[in-house]
Amino acid sequence: MLSQQEMSDRWEIQDLVFHYAHLIDTKSFDDLRDVFTVDAHIDYSVFGGSVGDLETTIAYLKEAVSEGVFPNSQHLNANVQVSVEGDTGKGRVMCYNPMEMAMPDGSTQVFMLGLWYVDEYRRTDVGWRISRRAEEKSWVFNVPDFMGL
């Protein structure tokens, strides 16, 4: 049976994962400093994104996922699998991510991504933080291609 501390740790990490999704969708990229450790390593390369530290990641997101490029998105997380050992943890989180992309002609296209986040977590003086995150690709679906547009 899980102890109260283990349950609390898992819920705090789950809240952290959901908070990350909210910050990405609201484009509050500077607030990711409240989600990741200062020395975090973040790998978005599976979808052509950046690999590096937190500041590199924030700069990348501000450019690549801006309102002008992706006006709307939803990062829906599920199947949050977390294991905790002391002050560290590991996780695998499913993400369903529909995104609206602005096209050069002023129209928009919707596409969807299926992915997993493979995470490492660390308890800090200010609570749990993600110390390592890598995206793992599952699938990509382009709505206009499917509809023959």
Image (tube, rainbow, N blue to C red):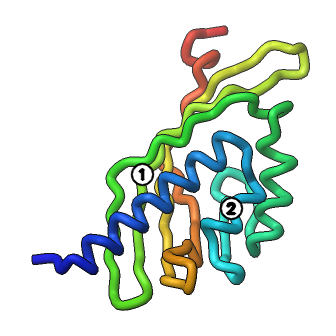
Q: Where is residue 2 drawn, in percent x and y?
A: 16, 76
Quadrant the C terminus occupies? top right
- Residue 113 is at least partly visible in this image: no
Q: Is residue 120 left or right of residue 7?
A: right
| Residue 94 badge | 1
Reading the chain from its start, which is encountered first: label 2 or label 1? 2
Residue at image location 54% in from the left, 54% down from the top: 19
Which tag is nearer the camera, tag 2 or tag 1? 2
- Give the quarter of the image for residue 42: bottom right
Q: Where is residue 76 drawn, in percent x and y?
A: 47, 41
| Element class at badge 2 | helix
* Towards the viewer: 123 or 135: 123
Q: Looking at the image, which residue sits at the far left?
A: 1
Quadrant the N terminus occupies? bottom left
Q: Looking at the image, which residue sits at the far bottom?
A: 86
* Towards the viewer: 102 or 10: 10
Q: Where is residue 95 drawn, in percent x and y?
A: 47, 47
Residue at image location 70% in from the left, 20% down from the top: 109
121 w.r.t. 93: above or below: below
Residue at image location 42% in from the left, 67% down from the top: 13
- Residue 82 is at least partly visible in this image: yes
8 w.r.t. 57: above or below: below
Residue type of the residue flagged with mark 1: Met
- Give the quarter of the image for residue 46: bottom right
- The residue wearing badge 2 is 32
Residue type of the residue flagged with mark 2: Leu
Crowd around label 1: few <14 · some 14–19 · many ≥20 (10 Å): many
Using the numbered discs, state the Cα–Cα distance from disc 2 to disc 1 in whole angstroms: 19 Å
57 w.r.t. 38: above or below: above
| Element class at badge 1 | strand
